Amino acid sequence: MTTHDVEIAIVGAGFSGLGAAIKLSQNGVDDYLVIDRGNDFGGTWRDNTYPGAACDVPSHLYSYSFAQNPDWSRSYSHQPEIHGYINGVADNYGIGARTWFTSEVESAHWNEDEHRWELSVSRSVDGGPAEQVTVRARHLVGAVGPLCEPNLPDIEGIDGFGGTIVHSARWDHEMDFTGKRVAVIGTGASAIQIVPQLGKVVGHLDVYQRTAPWIIPRNERPYLPVENWAFKNVPGLQNLIRGGIYGFNETVAAGMTFAPKALKPVELISRANIFKGIRDPKLREAVTPSYAVGCKRILKSNDWYPTLDQPNVDLVTDGIEKITEAGIVSRDGTLREVDVIVVATGFHVTDSPVFATIHGAGGRSLADVWDQTGMRGYKGSFVHGFPNMMLLIGPSTGLGHTSMVYMIESQLNYLVDYIRTARRSGITRTEVTEEAQDRFNSGVQHSLRNSVWVNGGCSSWYQDEHGNITTVWPGFTFTFRNATRRFDIAAYDVQKGADQTASTASGAAPQPAVAGS
């Protein structure tokens, strides 16, 4: 087994991991390694290739502020274009040279004696057999994101199904759905994009709905060549558009967090979308949610409701009792025979298997800690008991109204200043205090007390098993940007050591390049 020493190990090569590498490089920090189990950059936009996969945030906002793209083909981008954008940015900044692909981090353990993280990595090079490598890093950046581990439903008999099971995040492109009997389990963000595409080719489609989502129209259109020319040549135009989209979306945040009744216009738009897309009154009633708009993620689609209204599509709301070799049995006892089951049941967000592989001070895993306390951290970044580890898109950073890239860039500011502070001061161990973490989380829950997630009448992945809303940021995203602009060392217990970098020993440190909006 070989050992590789590095100052910073970044696990994950999606938007957050790539952004971390770029910002560190821009600030003179080059002793890092990006590790990812995939074949290239992209994260969730590499892995989710199901038909119809697209983003529900406008293209101009769903991109890095420091790498805006004037060549977007549409107002809302689809998976292949986003995946290509991410890899193009990586190429432009030369991040591939410091990245290990097809490398699975099997475990990460904190070494208290050396103040380092030790990662056990299964690495395959150029398609060869995997070899075990130990990566030792002073700092660990967790950039795997919340949408990385598919969630398979715990349904009786699913392993005995005689047909084919396909998960939305592991799409089988060899499967020909033409003329087949297909069942889709789930009606979330992935399902509302998959179902319209399948509805065009299958013989019959059963859609299993546990909870109806609120869905508003998707105002997507292709950009004209003259628009792309303007994006590229008119100074400030993209920033102006980006700012306008951002500002409009922040008004939705106010309704979600502080005044849910202010979201009534969104509900009326969604109801009109139902009325326009579905003719059958009973079906309209079945797809109308019984909870407040915004309590679950608000989705966007123009073709979901018309697809459900097709004669070869049935919406099943009775719930699933079990799966047999032949098909799915609903709770009313009806067996619906199918050839293929498409599982669109999302991801492990608050209970990711990744948590069990990370072991902090004292040997406790992140899963053990969060099973006891719920998913908690400090500013979505650091967790008490896990020194020198910063999470990107950690607890309380999710959004229901705008681009996660904005939150990622805010955390990158915090990351850069954290590394800068540690280098300048010779700090070898940094751990957020339990008191600071408790105060932060108490403040988050207090800010959420009037929110739609608490009072909206639904259960969702925003909420953990302890009843706390642990995945979303309460309020405006610019307040998070302000909170993470500088590393607040007073909230941490730190220890200094003698092994400092050359720039630290000289007292010099690179100034952070603060992300824009």
Image (cartoon, rainbow, N blue to C red):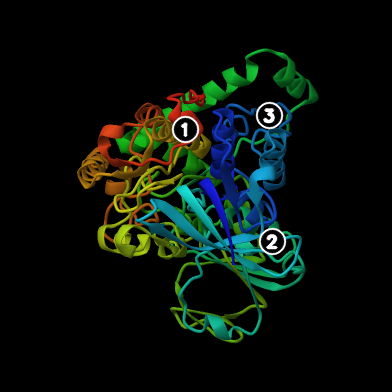
Helix, strand or loop under label 2 = helix
Residue 44 horizontal side relative to residue 450, left or right? right
In the image, residue 18 above or below residue 358: above
**Front disc: 2 or 1:** 1
Q: How many marks?
A: 3
Of mark 1 and mark 3, the one earlier in the sequence is 3
Q: In the rendering, at what x and y percent does residue 212 appear?
A: 46, 56
Q: Is residue 430 visible?
A: yes
Q: Nearer the viewer, residue 412 or 386?
A: 386
Q: CA distance from mark 1 to mark 3?
A: 24 Å
Q: Residue furthest right?
A: 225
**Quadrant in the picture for the N terminus:** bottom right
Mark on residue 198? 2
**Residue type, numbered disc 3:** Asn
Helix, strand or loop under label 1 = helix
Q: Residue at coordinates 73% horizontally, 59% vertically from top-left?
A: 200
Q: CA distance from mark 2 to mark 1?
A: 45 Å
In the image, residue 418 above or below residue 184: above
**Front disc: 3 or 2:** 3
**Residue type, numbered disc 1:** Val
Q: CA distance from mark 3 to mark 2?
A: 31 Å
**Residue type, numbered disc 2:** Leu
Q: Residue furthest top?
A: 235
Of mark 2 and mark 1, the one earlier in the sequence is 2
Q: Nearer the viewer, residue 383 or 74?
A: 383
Q: In the rendering, at what x and y percent does residue 88 appear?
A: 72, 38
Q: In the rendering, at what x and y percent does residue 31 appear?
A: 56, 41
Q: Which residue is mark 3?
A: 69
**Front disc: 1 or 3:** 1
Mark on residue 416? 1
Helix, strand or loop under label 3 = loop
Mark on residue 465? none
